[in-house]
Image (tube, grey):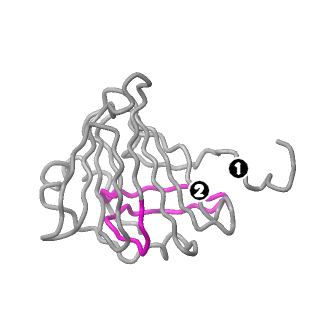
Amino acid sequence: MAKGKYAKCVIEVKDPRMKRDLFEGKVTNVLEFGTENFEKSAVWFHSCIVYAPGAGYGAGDIWERIRPSGEKEVIHASRHKHPADEVFMFLGTDPQHPDDLGGEVEFWLGKGEDEERYRFTKSTIVYVPGNTWHNPQWFREVHRPFIEVVILVLPEYASSEKRYIEKTQEYPPAFEKEYGHILKEYRGTTE
């Protein structure tokens, strides 16, 4: 790549080096972008390709990744809320029918008496206002691969832990009833 004034703003996508057993054979993480890639970035960005059902985000599984620094990071996925707005985009890949997601996604917003479950089969954007509980999400059906893109913009980028207001491992009873038996083998402790 040519070097120039803005060369630092053109960043090659690298393997995010994530090991997530729950996703094996179902989801491929394409990239994650944040201060690890661009020191002054206030943007956190994530994308993945979903190609088989039976996995999801924020569902309590434990996974790991190797940071660009070479450091191993262990993460316990959770329901959570951020101080800023977050956008989730679920995009179909059929060029003749881009509105058809190619599967079914379940997405939870709120917590306790406030929580709501949404299921969709069309290309969909889920806008999560700051300070709103969200997750889990679950890929229920996949007929054709689709893409998920997540963008969180903070006034000033914060590290992984500081970008959350609060986290919990408590999940909606209906989610636990339907998927808890699947997730049992992927949950545990981070110790």
According to the picture, the residue beneath numbered tag 1 turns out to be 11
Drawn side of residue 90 relative to residue 15, left or right: left
- Which image quadrant: the C terminus? bottom left
Task: Locate residue 100: give its quadrant.
Answer: top left
Residue at the extreme top: 96
Q: For the magenta stretch, what is the residue range?
A: 58-86
Amino acid at the residue labelled 2? Phe
Crowding at dot 1, Cα within 10 Å, few <14 / some 14-19 / many 20+, comes out as: few
The correct choice, above or below, for 13 with respect to 167 in the image is above
Q: Residue 166: horizontal and vertical position, in percent?
A: 35, 76
Residue 14: say if magenta.
no
Q: At 79% from the left edge and 55% from the top edge, which residue is drawn?
A: 6
Q: Residue at x 38, y 43 (%)?
A: 90
**Along the viewing direction, whichever of 62 and 43 lies nearer the viewer:** 43
The image shows residue 13, relative to residue 102, as above or below, that is below
The N terminus is located in which quarter? Answer: top right
Asked whether the beta carbons under mark 2 and mark 1 sit within 8 Å of each other, the answer is yes
Magenta highlight on residue 75: yes
Which mark is on residue 33? 2
